[in-house]
Amino acid sequence: MRIWNPATGTQEGEPLTGHDGGVRSVAVFTAPDGTPRLATGGDDGRVRIWNPATGTQEGEPLTGHTNWVKVMVVFAAPDGTPRLAAGGGIARSVRIWNPATGTQEGELLTGPGGGVRSVAVFTAPDGTPRLATGGDDGRVRIWNPATGTQEGEPLTPLTGHRDEVNVMAVFTAPDGTPRLATGSDRAVRIWNPATGTQEGEPLTGHDGGMRSVAVFAAPDGTPRIASASNDQMVRIWNPATNAQEREFFTSHRGGVRSVAVFAAPDGTPRLATAAGDEVVRIWNPATNASEGQPLSARKVGENTAAVFITPDGTFRRALADGSKEGRGWNPTTSAQKGKFFTGSDDWVDAAVVFTAPDGTPRLAIATGDRAVRIWNPATGTQEGEPLTGHDGGMRSVVVFTAPDGTPRIASASNDQMVRIWNPAADAQEREFFTQYHDAVRWMVVFAAPDGTPRLATGGDRAVRIWNPTTGTQEGKLLTGPGGGVRSVAVFTAPDGTPRLATGGDDGRVRIWNPTTAQEGKPLTGHTNWVRSVVVFTAPDGTSRLATASDDRTVRIWNPTTGAQEGKPLTGHTNWVLSVVVFTAPDGTPRLATASRDQTVRIWNPRTRTGYVLPLTDKVHNLKVSHGLLLARTSSGYLVIDVSSVPTDAA
């Protein structure tokens, strides 16, 4: 975590480090001496207290949470001292902490449904605090933290949320009583917690799932709501009139994950927005104008890569570095082979390689300005005009072969749309709305039993199958309980038909027949998100799955029997973010895993032995091509010749 001075745009002091994983939540409270303290909740399930003046942690971490601490708020106990309400993740509970003593107070606040996604605090008519929690089940619950009990029924009218309640904020109505503003499925809803009713119609306009809401006072003293979404937009709402007052495009790469309010030196409100691009931007909500330079401690490193074969038979990797330039490299010699502009002043979000009609490679690059561009890496030139039409940041691009044997490009976006492009004609052929409430997170191609291509898309908690030739959805919606789908792999069942394996936020792996529905029970064993799924072939010729999880383990599964094979592969000390498969010199499979613990590990799934490659940076993703392992780190790509790595060392 970093401390910034928004007036000067500079970081103050050193980063506050200590969490074993990412920081999910932060809250501010006043210590007994009158100075501020920070409380942070992390992926490691711990709450830590910091003195921002000294940059040091105070006391031991507050432990007891069994999953990442996603939400946290501060409220005052009857004696006037601060308390923390923290929880979230897969867990269905909120815990109350006394930060002065480091002890938990009372029982867990636990209700039915899925995990806790949001929490807010307000004052009841009797002057005592209440907590409001939003869950995976789309409901809002009110709690009395003094008694540890739920008050009244969950807030769930017929017009309520269709998906998890991700965000929540409190404001005061003109009559002086509290109101809740909640959001998730592209809408903000206003609730009266005293009566349990929704007030007015939902506030709609966002083209992506809701990520954050905040409240500030307009010049006339009445409340305004700022909502941030995966569509990269911030919208300002007047809850009294139930209307939008203004909107602005944030220029963040990808969805806006958080919006917060603070006071400028003249006392007027400012908004701070943050996204996955590791940049914070400051806005004046009265003018929609950005103020000052973006606040960033980000290292400029490559964001995406694709590998292709050159006409002379050698191969190259194409990297994009967060600017408007792409570069071609010979990974064997580490020499740059040409440079080309992506044609955009924005980030490169995804890249894929395909073969042109003349047999030479082309790159399809998706950029943060919502366009796909086709490049000839041999000449470094863009071919044709940008392919435009998406209304949100790009998430994925894939290539498939049309019935006439020529390539097509499918692009998926935060606008919940998939678009099919013919790169030879420089034109869109069709589009379809995927019906997700959030972004289309991923997309893969597989062959139907008749040999024609199909697309599988993931978002929310569902997988949908599409025929890209007709633009129609096929079969049933593939959905199960739990959180979102994080990863997918395609394999062939013993009967020769395709199957999908998905990993989810609920720590489970599910096997799907894309023509029918889920097959068998979920594969259970992981205790946290399943980030990555890969398929490899066992010695008997049947398929196996390897899954990587935030629980720091890799597990091997037989998808036909649904059984885990052997004990988990352990050794990583932080999230395992990626797993890939490659072939060892003896022709048998090996697994490579990447983790936030700054290591890559090579595993023999048969002998369960591994080899550790220590690095000096966090590893986010792995790719394998032509005997090389490409590890994407926070500061660039590292290319590893897998033939030089011992694959059977203990």
Image: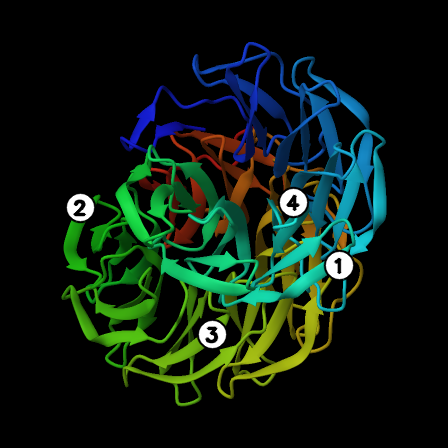
Q: Which residue is mark 1?
A: 197
- Residue 432 percent across, percent down from the top left: 50, 80
Sequence-wise first label, 4 or 1 = 4
| 263, above or below 257, in the image | above
Amino acid identity at mark 1: Thr
Find numbered disc 2 in the image and state the secondary structure of the residue it sits on.
strand
Sequence-wise first label, 4 or 2 = 4
Find numbered disc 1 in the image and state the secondary structure of the residue it sits on.
strand
Amino acid identity at mark 3: Val
Residue density around tag 3, few if under 14, some if 14–19, many if 20 or more, within 10 Å: many
Amino acid identity at mark 2: Ala
> Distance from label 3 to label 1 (Cα)?
37 Å
Closer to the eye: label 3 or 2: 3
> Distance from label 2 to label 1 (Cα)?
64 Å
Q: Residue at x 28, y 52 (%)?
A: 319
- Residue 450 percent across, percent down from the top left: 58, 85
Closer to the eye: label 2 or 1: 1
Q: Which residue is mark 2?
A: 335
Let me know if residue 333 appears in the view. yes
Sequence-wise first label, 4 or 3 = 4
Query: Residue 418: which numbered mark, if any?
Result: 3
